Image: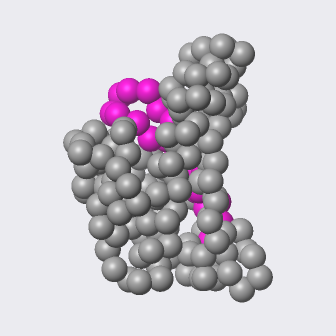
Amino acid sequence: MKSYYLRRLTVSQSIEFDLDTEQLWELISAGGNLNSSHPFCKTNEVIIWENEKHRDRLVYLNGRTYIRNFQTWEEGKGYTLLIGEENGPQSFVEWIIDSVGDKSKLTITVYPFMLAKLPKILAFIPHKLWVQPRLNSYLKSVLMGFNHYATTEEIVPRNHFGKHPWFSD
């Protein structure tokens, strides 16, 4: 199944945190964590959050509702998930933690469902001109939201890093 998603064009962003990998893992693996750290999240409701099974509902500021179904879960290292509207097209997403000295780095890579039905050669230009800039902006805001929460322990204000055309109200 994973190989199906890996054939898609991707968008990836990273940010370093003044946290060790264990602290970063605690931040990104807590159930409902998007409520305090995601700048476009209206609500992040846990559906199931157990050792082997993780699933939640993310409602964006504009009301768009996505289900996140976690596919892999590697303690302290990261996870993969499928995200999209229930019974709709799904994007594959990887969250990977790396150690950088006494700090850590979080990389989020999205294999978006948009344009996935097109051959890569036809999808390349719309991906570069439309999908990639919007996803880059989104991922930067999400990562900066986690960093904001990690450094200030304050809930990230909604649209804190600017509005997003796909997810803001």
* Color theme of the render: one colour
- Residue lying at the far right in this picture: please name it: 101
At x 56% / y 46%, what residue is drawn?
136
- The reply to whether the magenta stretch includes residue 85 is yes
Q: Which corner quadrant of the image does residue 125 belong to?
A: top right
- Above or below for 117 versus 33: above
Q: Which residues are magenta?
A: 76-97
Left or right, 63 with reference to 98: left
- Above or below for 19 versus 6: below
Residue 150 position in % (x across, y down): 47, 79
Q: How many marks?
A: 0
At x 34% / y 80%, what residue is drawn?
154
Q: Which corner quadrant of the image does residue 122 belong to?
A: top right
| Main secondary structure of the magenta stretch | strand
Judge whether residue 9 can be spotted in this image.
yes
Residue 95 position in % (x across, y down): 59, 56
Judge whether residue 52 can be spotted in this image.
no
Quadrant of the snapshot with the N terminus: top right
At x 64% / y 48%, what residue is drawn?
12
Residue 84 position in % (x across, y down): 40, 36
Task: In this rendered view, identify the residue nearer to me: 114 or 160.
Answer: 160
- Above or below for 44 versus 64: below
At x 44% / y 74%, what residue is drawn?
148
- The reply to whether the magenta stretch includes residue 75 is no
Left or right, 24 with reference to 49: right
Quadrant of the snapshot with the C terminus: top left
Task: In this rendered view, identify the residue nearer to me: 55 or 8.
Answer: 8
